[in-house]
């Protein structure tokens, strides 16, 4: 099943932040309520290398996220516009694996995607490779999806 909703897309271009600061900016906008964020390299005026920072946010969190962008970056302006989006309905469930319980997202097409943070936490706790935990959670998630 699909559902539609409306979000706000915020964009800005930055040519004078370190990669560490850009990464921190993405963390902060997510903490402030952004649904997603990403950075794409670009060439700016005068052939300077820069980055396009894009943030997806609902209207409710727009002002808080915009404030974070201005606080944590060197930008002097942002662009924003409403966008419609279509997405598959999904549900998060806890799946039991040989490494422990992992949060897995199941969409309406019966696909299973282990949640990164849940896998990372278990991998660190058990001191095993992340990829082992992820693959086991994916395998168990697919098994669960096929049962339903």
Image (cartoon, grey):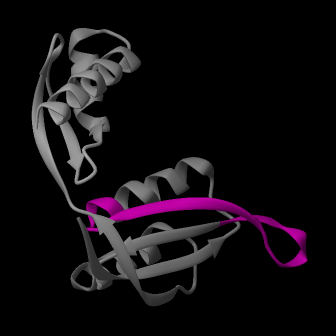
Q: Is residue 59 left or right of residue 29?
A: left
| Labels in figure, total | 0
Viewer-nearest residue: 122 or 77: 122
Indicate whether residue 81 is drawn in magenta.
no
Q: Quadrant of the C terminus?
A: top left
Q: Position of residue 60 (x, y in %)?
A: 21, 83
Viewer-nearest residue: 11 or 119: 119
Q: What residue is shown at x 30% (from left), y 85% (from top)?
A: 63
Q: Position of residue 89 (x, y in %)?
A: 21, 61
Residue stretch rendered in magenta on the structure: 30-51
Q: Position of residue 72 (x, y in %)?
A: 45, 67
Q: Is residue 97 left or right of residue 38?
A: left
Q: Is residue 43 visible?
A: yes
Q: What residue is shown at x 50% (from left), y 51% (from top)?
A: 23
Q: Is residue 30 left or right of residue 76?
A: left
Indicate whether residue 47 is drawn in magenta.
yes
Q: Position of residue 62 (x, y in %)?
A: 31, 82
Q: Residue furthest right?
A: 46
Q: What residue is shown at x 9% (from left), y 34% (from top)?
A: 94
Q: What residue is shown at x 40% (from left), y 72% (from top)?
A: 56
Q: Residue furthest front?
A: 147
Q: Is residue 68 visible?
A: no
């Amino acid at each position: 099943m699909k559902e539609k909703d409306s979000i706000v897309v915020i964009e800005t271009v930055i040519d004078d932040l370190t990669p560490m600061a850009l990464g921190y900016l993405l963390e902060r906008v997510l903490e402030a309520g952004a649904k997603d964020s990403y950075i794409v390299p670009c060439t700016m005026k005068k052939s300077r290398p820069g980055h396009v920072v894009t943030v997806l946010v609902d209207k409710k969190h727009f002002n808080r996220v915009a404030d974070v962008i201005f606080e944590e970056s060197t930008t002097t302006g942002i662009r924003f516009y409403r966008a419609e989006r279509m997405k598959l309905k999904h549900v998060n469930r806890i799946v039991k694996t040989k490494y422990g319980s992992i949060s897995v997202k199941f969409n309406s097409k019966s696909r299973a995607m282990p949640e990164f943070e849940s896998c990372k936490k278990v991998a660190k706790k058990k001191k095993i490779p992340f990829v082992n935990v992820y693959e086991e959670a994916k395998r168990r998630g697919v098994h669960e999806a096929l049962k339903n």
